[in-house]
Amino acid sequence: MNGFISLKGKDVDRLFKGQLKVYRGKRKGKRSKDGRIVRDVELRAYVGDWDYKVPKAVLEGLEGGKINLTWLAKSANSDISTGAGAPSEEKFFEAWREFLNALRRGWDDNKIFRCGVLIKGTCMDCGRVHIIKNPCKREWCPDCGVPGSAYHMYLFAKALGYAKEMWRQSGAVGYLVITCPLELREKWKDKEVLNKVVRYIQRMLAREGFPFGYSKWHFAGDENPGKWYPHLNVLIPAGYLKPEKLERIKKLIEKHLGVKVVHYEYAKDPERIIHMVYYITRPTWNMQVEVESAGWSRFRKSRIWGKKYFKKAHIWREFLRDLNHIKRERGEGNLNVVLIDLKEDKKEERAEKGNLTIEEEDLREMLGPVSDEPEIEEFPDDKEELILSAIEVWYVREALRDDKCSRCGGEIRWEGVIRDLDNEYIEGEVFRIGWNMWVIDERRYPKEEKKEKARSP
């Protein structure tokens, strides 16, 4: 994979925060070329340090003390020139930003978590192995149940997509807070009661002219630490509400739920909306100590209604989904970008040839005539390697969304949840895509060679 570099000779123990360990000498009957074997603590597997590879930009960042996420973000937001053919150039640079952000997100420190399970998938054609570690996503988990955790970011990303669609359709996002009164808190310790509350609120708001929205429970607040203090946060596609409309909603809630404290505000500014969504989606279970987590594992803490009203939140997602692979080659004084669409009609024909490349003439035929095409200048070597590794990281993630192999485009057979790799020694290359994603290309020997290896002492 382009833009990746091995850990040979690197201070692995220090750089990888305890997730990788270096051993010298023999392990599982194998001896490395220079006596160094890397043990991946997360996978519970051994690899020669020359075979364990990470993006070069990430490794240099770790050697400097910390991955320079700010620099990656700035690289992802470089200025775009305008002029003849600018729309085509903008489309390329928008994709470039997406690649760099995929690399940045994969190596963000909030993606380091001790909980979770490993999910393994193997390509049925080429044998490439993909392993993903997912957090447990339990709000009472010591790792997931804190602001800024991977679980929080997961909820935040989903809710932000919903909020963007509300903002797109109505020009603002309304925010309701329905707080449980003191006299009902014992009753509201039952998850079935909370389910009934959510169902009533959603149906009532739909009848009142808000056909879609998002809700998220908070179980405690900053003002009463340790206390069970449930309150329901609701986002709706609305801005300013007339006093009589808001008063009607409050009276309906009081009549059916016995709740008098209902707060409402709205935001039009995107920055304010982002801040609001981040706050609403934060985990709060561990802020209280009165209710045990037993019996709450299947409780839905966040929900939407009116699913048909929600559309794609990312304006460039449709464009990027059509591009399942991007291969970049150096040409005569410029940088040629080759777009490969795995869903295009010629996919099987290319796969039979043993590769998934596409000729420039075929690409131009697919995209149609473009006048005044801009020339994209060559990048310096260091930025070239950064973009190459970012493209690889992005493509692995995009391919897995469709259960496709990131090398040949074949179908992936998911083996489900695995505990670990059982202290296996991996004979092949291991690519660390992010803190919680791996790609393994095992070496395959011909049968005759295997027999000879078996006979040799």
Image (spheres, grey):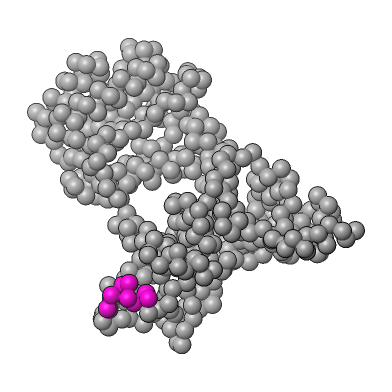
Figure quadrant of the N terminus: bottom right
Q: Return the residue nearer the eye: 12 or 24.
A: 24
**Image-quadrant location for residue 416:** top right
Q: At which x and y percent is residue 325?
A: 45, 65
Secondary structure character of the magenta stretch overall: helix
The relative height of residue 165 versus residue 294 in the rendered view (above or below) is below
Q: At which x and y percent is residue 348?
A: 45, 64
Judged from this view, the residue extending furthest toward the bottom is: 332
Figure quadrant of the C terminus: bottom right
Question: Residue 352 vs residue 200: left or right?
Answer: right
**Image-quadrant location for residue 64:** bottom right
Judged from this view, the residue extending furthest toward the right is: 457
Q: Give the residues in magenta.
A: 362-370
Question: Residue 351 vs residue 38: left or right?
Answer: left
**Image-quadrant location for residue 228:** top left
Q: Is residue 332 magenta?
A: no
Residue at point 36%, 82% (across, down) = 375
Q: Return the residue nearer the eye: 179 or 34.
A: 34
Residue at point 42%, 25% (across, down) = 299
Q: Return the residue nearer the eye: 116 or 351.
A: 351
Q: At which x and y percent is residue 114?
A: 60, 40
Answer yes or no: is residue 323 visible. Answer: no
Answer yes or no: is residue 451 visible. Answer: yes
Residue at point 51%, 67% (across, down) = 352
Q: At which x and y percent is residue 440?
A: 62, 56
Residue at point 19%, 26% (across, down) = 204
Question: Residue 407 vs residue 51: left or right?
Answer: left
Please state the total of marks drawn on the protein image: 0
Q: Is residue 367 magenta?
A: yes
